[in-house]
Amino acid sequence: MSKAKLQSAIERVVASGGRAFIPYIMAGDGGLTKLRDQLLFLQEAGATAVELGIPFSDPVADGPTIQEAGKRALALGVTLRGVLEEVGRLREEVSIPIVLMTYLNPVYRYGIEAFANDCAEAGVSGVIVPDLPLEESELLHHDLNEQDIALIQLVSLTSPVKRIERIAQASEGFLYAVAVTGITGARAAFTADIGVHLERLKEASPVPVMAGFGISTPEQVREMGKLADGVIVGSRIVDALHEGDLEAVKALIGASKMVYR
C-alpha cells in the first residue's frame, strides 16, 4: 500500500457519489487471531479503509469504550510488533488500506526507523499519532515519507484558522477532522457550527476531509456525509464487534453509500 492508494481509495468513493467510511477497530481485542476475520468482514461490508488501533496503557484521546478494548488486548499480550507481524501475514488477503492509530511512546520504544520499515513491510498505508503535535511531526515524517506512508494530521474544532491551514497542508492521505471537543465516544448531537468548520477544512485541505469522534448512528453517518468526504466510526464499531452485532456494523457502513449528488 502507499499514501497515494489511501487517498485515491477515498476519492474514488466520493467521485461515485458516496462517502468514504473508515471503521476503527482495536487490534487484538479478543486476540490477534480474530484480526483476519474482522478485517475481511469489514472489507466485504464495504469499508473504504480500516483504522487499526494499537493498544496502549495511557490512551489520552480515547473514551471509555476504546480504553476498555485496549485493556482487553493488553491483557492478552498484544503488542505493536505483534500487530505489524499479523497485518503483514494478511497482506495478500486484505486489499483495502490499513491505517495504524498509535501513540508516540510505543513508536519511540520500537525505534522510529524500524517502525517505518516494518509498517511498509506489513503494507500499512498511513499512521495517526494523536499525541504528536504538528510542530514535532518531523520526528516521524521523514522516515514514514521514505517508506511512502502517510502521516495523517488531526485538526480540532478549536483550532484557529491559520493553524488549520498549516495542519491541512501537512496532512497526507486525508485530514482527520475531530468533530467534537474531547475524547472519543458516541454523542447525541454535534455543535451547530460543525458544517461551517468542515467547509473551512475542505477549502484549506489538498487531501480529503474525514470526520471522526462521536459518530455512532447511521443517521449521523448520513448527516456528516453531507459535510465531509467521509466518516470514521470507532466506539460504536468496537462495541458492535465485541458484542458480535455484525448487522449494526453493516448498517453504519451502508449509510455511507447513499448518493450525495
Image (cartoon, rainbow, N blue to C red):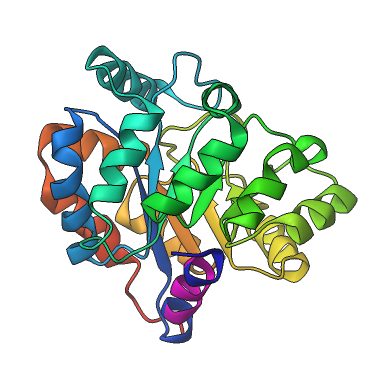
In the picture, which quadrant includes the N terminus?
bottom left
Q: Position of residue 82 (x, y in %)?
A: 31, 31
Is residue 155 visible in this depiction of the protein? no
Query: From the viewer's perspective, is 139 left or right of 6?
Result: right
- Give the prevailing secondary structure in the magenta stretch: helix
139 displayed left or right of 69: right
Residue at image x 48%, y 71%? 5
Question: Percent x, y for residue 205?
Answer: 72, 66
Residue 27 place in picture, x, y as percent = 30, 35
Along the viewing direction, whichever of 84 and 220 lies nearer the viewer: 84
Q: Which residues are magenta?
A: 6-12
- 153 up-or-down from 208: above or below: above
Of the pair 69 and 147, the residue shown nearer to us: 147
- Determine the image quadrant of residue 147: bottom right
Which residue does the image show at 65% across and 60% down from the upper left?
198
Q: Is residue 9 magenta?
A: yes
Quarter of image, res 197: bottom right
